[in-house]
Image (spheres, rainbow, N blue to C red):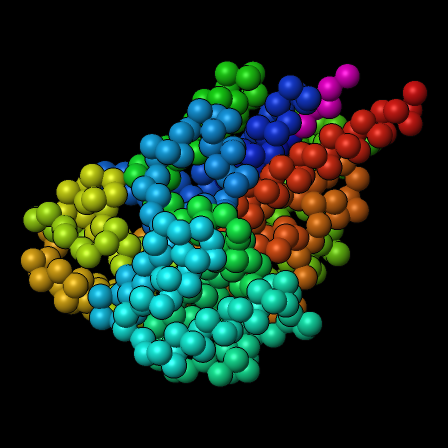
Amino acid sequence: MKPRVAVIGAGWAGLSAAIELVGQADISVFEAGREPGGRARRVDTTSRFLDNGQHILVGAYHQTLAMMRKVGADPETLFERVPMQWQQPFGMRMWCPPLPAPLHLMAGLVTARGIGWRDKYSLGRALTRLRLAGWRLDEDVSVAAWLAREGQSDTLCRLFWHPLVLSALNTPVAEASMQILANVLRDTLGSPLRSDSDLLLPRSDLSELFPLPANDWLGEQGVRLVYGQRVERLQREGDGWRVAGEYFDAVVVAVAPYHVEGLLDDERLLSVIKAFDYCPIYTVYLQFPVPVNLPGPMCGLDDGADWLFDRDCLTGETGMVAAVLSAPSEETVADRDALLKRIVAAVSRVDPTLVEPERSRIIAEKRATFAARVGLARPDTRFGLHSLYLAGDWVASDYPATLEGAVRSGITAATALLQDFTQNHNDDE
Ligand SMILES: Cc1cc2nc3c(=O)[nH]c(=O)nc-3n(C[C@H](O)[C@H](O)[C@H](O)COP(=O)(O)OP(=O)(O)OC[C@H]3O[C@@H](n4cnc5c(N)ncnc54)[C@H](O)[C@@H]3O)c2cc1C
């Protein structure tokens, strides 16, 4: 007998859970929005589709890439895969040649421009010490404290560490967990596979990368997909749960932490969630009347922390640039006109032919990711709520809030659910 399972939320975590359950459960997916994808999807603006935020993946996202392949989305055509590189036209420039790991990184560091020999040595030494420690800290500390301990200079922090931490963890360095950063470094720069540190830049919109192919594939497998239905409070019933008026043997709750409150009144879980804080990501889309010619598909803005994406060369959207601001301070984004002016001026410095955009759009995701702070306790998929499994980028894992974290959590939730169901079934016989 197959269990009847309700998956709540069709973000990358919920979709992955449903895909993993196919063939072994009778599945219904409930999604509050009208489309799948959650925090990584395209949005319909008045003139065109835009991503809710520019995303970047890395070669180490093995589970995400496997999920994409499973539903027929080909990573080879959907991404521009570029070797690890760091392009700040007015800062640090590094490009890792196609040598076996870790030689590619060493060569990249030695030939890097924009930082002196002392900084190259100090950066190489800090990474080597971390590698020799197995990418584990005896005790977690903030990235800022670790950088001070490792004697990283102000220049290195401004040009390398701060932009890296903001793009990987979307959390200010003073609060960000060094252990979580070390986990990301372990799987990318520290991986024995050079391709794990490649950058994967989407060539299509985010929905086409995975959510839409996943939706179509699930539909073909007979999964019921219900969009535009926000599930209200879950009711316990016997060994299972009542969801949207129907009985289910088990539930996968794959919503963001701040949406759990509306679904469950478990005090223990709610108190864990109360400890979460969130950081914003702003994406500024600029449509210029002329073709874009940035020095690379992704390059840093002059103040070091923000990144520009050449959508003209990546997605073929002629004249389009996306600027990403990770965890910006409130003052930086308080005045939208001033923000726009600052970004346009910075873009013009990188490519002087880009002066006046014809159109612009700022998409603010105020709670884009949880703040990956030192000591944050994240719940396991099995939280002691019988036949209920948590999924989402915030559920216990060694990753920050990322697509890979979301996909892995969906797989973990589905695996735990099936294990428990089989076990309970065997016990009953
Ligand atoms: C602007 C931005 C940029 C980012 N950049 C990157 C990046 O470059 N690389 C990277 O790896 N990650 C990035 N991330 C993080 C990544 O997008 C997230 O980690 C991931 O999308 C989270 O997926 P999820 O399925 O866990 O949650 P969500 O995407 O939040 O999915 C939850 C779903 O549940 C639905 N839902 C909520 N409540 C209910 C309810 N009661 N009933 C039914 N449905 C409900 C929601 O509508 C939503 O669709 C970025 C995020 C943002 C916002």
Residue 4 falls inside the magenta stretch = yes
**Quadrant in the rendering for residue 245:** top right
* The C terminus: image quadrant: top right
Q: Residue at 40%, 34% (x, y): give it.
A: 75
Side of 279 relative to 118 (left or right): right
* Quarter occupied by the N terminus: top right
Q: Tell me what residue is drawn at x 57 percent, y 28 percent.
A: 19
Percent x, y of residue 82: 33, 47
Q: Magenta span has 58? A: no
The answer to whether 101 appears left or right of 270 in the picture is: left
Which quarter of the picture shows residue 120?
bottom left
| Magenta-tinted stretch | 1-5
280 to the left or right of 251:
left
Q: Nearer the viewer, residue 355 or 80?
A: 80
Residue 237 visible in rendering: no
Residue occupying the point 50% across, 74% down: 125
Q: Is residue 149 above or below residue 97?
A: below
Regarding residue 83, the answer to whether it shows in the image is yes
Give 281 or 202, whichever is nearer the viewer.
202
Looking at the picture, tell me which residue is in the foreground, 34 or 408. Answer: 408
The residue at 29%/43% (across/down) is 50
Q: Nearer the viewer, residue 352 or 285?
A: 352
* Magenta span dominant secondary structure: loop
The image shows residue 401 at horizontal and vertical percentages of 52, 54
